[in-house]
C-alpha cells in the first residue's frame, strides 16, 4: 500500500503511550475520521469526525495501517517513553512502534 492510497479513507486511529517499563499505559488517544492529507515527511493528517478544523496527525508509515472488512482502516501505534529520569526543561524521548497485532 502506498501512503497516497490512504487519502480520503475512513479511519479509526489509536495511539497508546507507555512508560519505560513498556507495559504501564500512561495515556491513550483514539479518534475516528477521514484522512485529510498525506505527506511522507510531515505525516498523515486525519480530520476528526470529518471536521477539517479538528486535525490529528500520525506518523507517515503504512505498516501501522490495516484494512477492515467494511473498507475502512484502523491504525494503531504504541509510543514508549525511553527515559526513566527527566529534568525539567529537558526533552523527553519517545519511541513509536506500529501495533501490528492489536486486539480491539
Image (cartoon, grey):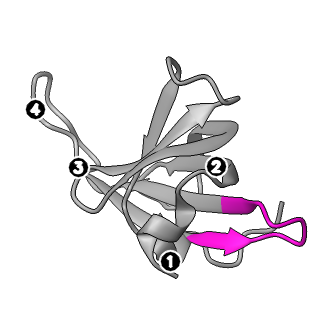
Instruction: Give the foreground label among 2 and 4.
Output: 2
Is 96 part of what is drawn in magenta? no
Residue position for label 4: 90
Query: How far apart in space, not on screen, are marks 3 and 1 (Cα)?
Result: 22 Å
Magenta segment boundaries in residue numbering: 65-74
Q: Which element type, helix, strand or loop, lies under badge 3?
A: loop
Question: Considering the image in quadrants, where does the C terminus appear?
Answer: bottom right
Q: Which mark is first along the chain, 1 or 3?
A: 1
Position above or below: 69 against 55: below
Query: How far apart in space, not on screen, are marks 3 and 2 (Cα)?
Result: 22 Å
Q: Which mark is first along the chain, 4 or 2?
A: 2
Query: How far apart in space, not on screen, are marks 4 and 1 (Cα)?
Result: 31 Å
- Count how many numbered circles sit on residues in the image: 4
Query: How far apart in space, not on screen, are marks 2 and 4 (Cα)?
Result: 29 Å
Q: Which mark is first along the chain, 2 or 3?
A: 2
Position above or below: 62 against 49: below
Q: Which element type, helix, strand or loop, lies under badge 1?
A: helix
Question: Is the residue marked by circle 4 packed among few (<14), some (14-19), or many (20+) residues within 10 Å?
Answer: few
Residue position for label 1: 63
- The residue that appears at 61% across and 39% down in the rendered structure is 28
Residue position for label 3: 93
Residue found at the very far right of the displayed protein: 69
In the rendering, which numbered label is found on residue 13? 2
Position above or below: 1 against 56: below
Question: Is the residue marked by circle 3 packed among few (<14), some (14-19), or many (20+) residues within 10 Å?
Answer: few
Q: Which mark is first along the chain, 1 or 4?
A: 1
- The residue that appears at 73% across and 72% down in the rendered structure is 67
Instruction: Give the foreground label among 3 and 1.
Output: 1
Query: How far apart in space, not on screen, are marks 4 and 3 (Cα)?
Result: 10 Å
Q: Which mark is first along the chain, 2 or 1?
A: 2
Amino acid at each position: 500500500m502506498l501512503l497516497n492510497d490512504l487519502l480520503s479513507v475512513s479511519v479509526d486511529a489509536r495511539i497508546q503511550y507507555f512508560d519505560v517499563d513498556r507495559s504501564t499505559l500512561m495515556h491513550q488517544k483514539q479518534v475516528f475520521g477521514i484522512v485529510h492529507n498525506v505527506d511522507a515527511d510531515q505525516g498523515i493528517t486525519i480530520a476528526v469526525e470529518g471536521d477539517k478544523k479538528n486535525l490529528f496527525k500520525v506518523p507517515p508509515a503504512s505498516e501501522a495501517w490495516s484494512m477492515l472488512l467494511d473498507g475502512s482502516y484502523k491504525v494503531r501505534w504504541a509510543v514508549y517513553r525511553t527515559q526513566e529520569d527527566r529534568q525539567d526543561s529537558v526533552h523527553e524521548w519517545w519511541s513509536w512502534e506500529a501495533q501490528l497485532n492489536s486486539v480491539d
